[in-house]
Amino acid sequence: MDLQASPSTKSYAANKGVDLEELARKTGRTTLGREDVDAHLGGAAPSMAGPDQTRYWDVDHAAHGPVTEEPLSRMAKLAAANLGAASSLIPQVTHHDRADISAVESLRKAWRADAQARGLKLTALAFHVMALARCLTEFPRFNASLTPDGETLVLKTYVHIGIAVDTPNGLMVPVIRNADRKGLWELSSEIADLAARAQARKIGPDEMGGASMSISNLGGIGGTAFTPIVNPPELAILGITRTETVTVWDGDTPRPVPMVPLDLSYDHRVINGADAARFMTRYCQLVADPRQLLI
């Protein structure tokens, strides 16, 4: 029998005292893995739903062709563990919407010279932070955290917003403290400062925790929609992708409107679909009419 088994499987079987050739004859199979060895030793097929499920991912990839290895950074390992747990344990739902960004773009254009005089680049993200801060004050269940036992909701009186930053060393989420108390220019300056220091790995641990909610902005890269993963202990996260031109009808007259796609993922244990819809309706109103944010 032409037995096929990876070197790691052969080594595993040898350590367990299992003859793979004999096991292949008994099972009538020519390809064996660790799970077959475990099933033979245990007398039953192992459960794929068990806590040690990842053992089935231990594959000898080099057996199938050339490979190289790249160790994950400490930051990437921490993020992977947290997001993996969140994806497994939180009943997450994503609500998709879009907002008219015309007025925001008009203000950015009108205030470009003023921004340059201040040494700033006025980005749409600053308006999004202001809109989110306003919504978090108007919808307090989004500005909350659930205790680990799932029995108590901790409502926050502060509004801190995390900004996900893609860096060569992995994803970092520095936090803008008291975003609801800051104006457009101050937010623009702080966003630029945090992003630059995150890229340079000059963000301290005390600048990365305690967010009420986070924003993951892919607008500068692309995409039409995605499903950001809630980062516990936060209860929701807002995703933003590239602005697109959408035809809106005023009666019988078509009108091109720049619309920004928005993706709100939330923890369904605390937030339901109607909550999310109301939250995003208000958010889109604020983005469409940003002067409400500047009053």
Image (tube, rainbow, N blue to C red):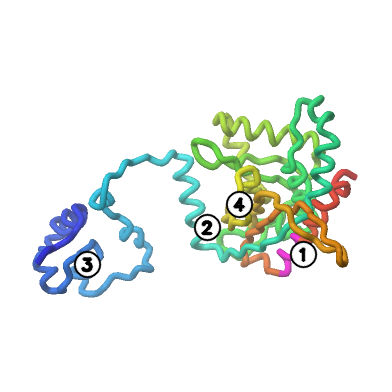
Q: What is the distance, in whole Å, between disc 3 and disc 2 at their CAs?
A: 31 Å
Q: Which region of the structure is painted magenta?
A: 274-280
Packing grade of label 4 (10 A; few <14, some 14-19, many >=20) is some
Disc 4 marks a residue whose amino acid type is Gly
Q: What is the distance, in whole Å, between disc 2 and disc 4 at their CAs?
A: 23 Å
Magenta span: predominant SS is helix
Disc 1 marks a residue whose amino acid type is Arg
- Please tell me the numbered disc located at residue 278: 1
Between discs 3 and 2, the one toward the N terminus: 3
Expressed as whole percent of the image width and height from the top left, the position of residue 69 reads 33, 41
Task: Quarter of the image for the N terminus: give it.
Answer: bottom left
Q: What is the distance, in whole Å, between disc 2 and disc 1 at their CAs?
A: 24 Å
Q: Is residue 15 visible?
A: yes
Packing grade of label 3 (10 A; few <14, some 14-19, many >=20) is many
Q: Secondary structure at mark 2?
A: helix
Disc 3 marks a residue whose amino acid type is Asp
Q: What is the distance, in whole Å, between disc 4 and disc 1 at their CAs?
A: 24 Å
Packing grade of label 2 (10 A; few <14, some 14-19, many >=20) is some
| Residue 276 located within the stretch drawn in magenta | yes
